[in-house]
Image (cartoon, rainbow, N blue to C red):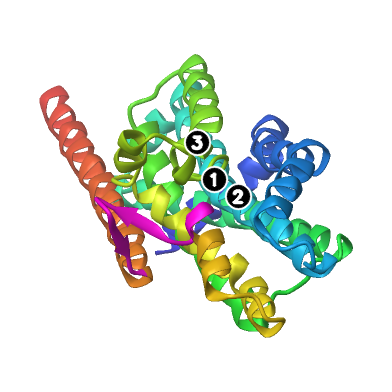
Amino acid sequence: MKTFWLLTKRNIKLFFKDKVMFLTSLIAPLILLVLYTLFLRKVYKDSFVSMLPPTTSKKVLNGVVGAQLLSSLLSVTCVTVAFCSNMLMVQDKVTGARKDLDVSPVRQSTVALSYYVASVVSTLIVCLVAYAGGCIYVALSGGWCFRFTDLLLILLDVIILVLFGTALSSIIHFFLSSQGQISAVGTIVCAGYGFICGAYMPLSQFSKGLATLFGFLPGTYGTSLVRNHCFAGVFEKMLDTGYSSEVINGIRDGFDCNLYMFGHGVPQFVSWLVIICSTVLLVGVYILQNVLRGRKIALSKRASA
């Protein structure tokens, strides 16, 4: 256990010490925040204005826009940052540090788990900073409608999505062994994940075939959970001020708070089950990868001896 904590501490220190990895992990949330603030805020605001009655208060309107921004920021950041923080696993292969660990008496499972836990901690720190920054932006824009329970549920969503994103990145990074591969995978994930999980564009705006296809991806359900918890306070405010349930349900459908598969609504508890079970499955695959790698290394040691 002492070796595990030493390796985990070493990996966390190296992540924050390596300015390239750290700054790369900050790029995704910063770009999203700037993109939404400078360009997409007006687009979303105009979209909501066309959907809501003209008597809508500024607080409700800003709250809806802020909830959309925060949910999109967090649902993407939790996964893309995990891919950046997990780069250390590949960099150790490039520098040869992983070979030193392979020939040491440290178990492969201990090494693998230290990478995973360190990446979770590093990613969570960055995502919590992004969460705080998003909340500050919503408050300054005059759209604060969050309840304390909503904030706690959003925090829980962030933790689960970080665990999911780290497990997914660990499996993919397991096969990488060069700096070029790291850059290629990071670019693809940062550019594409936000679209396929419904963060940049709601699934309701895709074709029926693509929406159904993306409905099989666990990240879609994680995004929906964050959406629901970010919008919950705004929807309650709208109900209190006399908005009909039809108007609110239309917004829920339009921004993936309500998910549908083959024409049937997906209950929120199913979204929880999908993202949690997917995370457990991915972690299991990652463990299996390292168990098989450990056996391969053990066999090669015996053959060389």
Which residue appears at 30% of the width and 42% of the height?
A: 212
Q: Position of residue 57 (x, y in %)?
A: 82, 69
Which residue appears at 68% of the width and 47% of the height?
A: 47
- Categorize mark 2 by other alpha carbons within 10 Å: few (<14), some (14-19), many (20+): many
Is residue 99 shown above or below 241? above
Give me the disc on residue 199: 1
Q: Which comes before the other along the chain, label 2 or label 3?
A: 2
The Cα atoms of the two marked residues, 2 and 3, are separated by 10 Å
The Cα atoms of the two marked residues, 1 and 2, are separated by 5 Å
Which span is picked out in magenta?
A: 253-267
Which residue appears at 77% of the width and 45% of the height?
A: 41
- Categorize mark 1 by other alpha carbons within 10 Å: few (<14), some (14-19), many (20+): many
Give me the disc on residue 195: 3
Splitting the image into 4 quarters, where does residue 208 fall? top left
Q: Does 261 appear in magenta?
A: yes
185 vs 17, left or right, is left
Where does label 2 land, which residue?
72
The quarter of the picture where the N terminus appears is bottom left
Q: Does 288 appear in magenta?
A: no
Disc 3 secondary structure class: helix
Is residue 176 shown above or below 170? above
Which residue appears at 59% of the width and 46% of the height?
A: 77
Q: Position of residue 253 (x, y in %)?
A: 47, 57
Which of 171/15 is in front? 171
In this view, which residue lies farthest toward the top? 180
Splitting the image into 4 quarters, where does residue 301 fall? top left
Q: Mark 3–mark 1 contact, CB under 8 Å?
A: yes
Q: Mark 1–mark 2 contact, CB under 8 Å?
A: yes
Disc 1 secondary structure class: loop
163 vs 281, left or right, is right
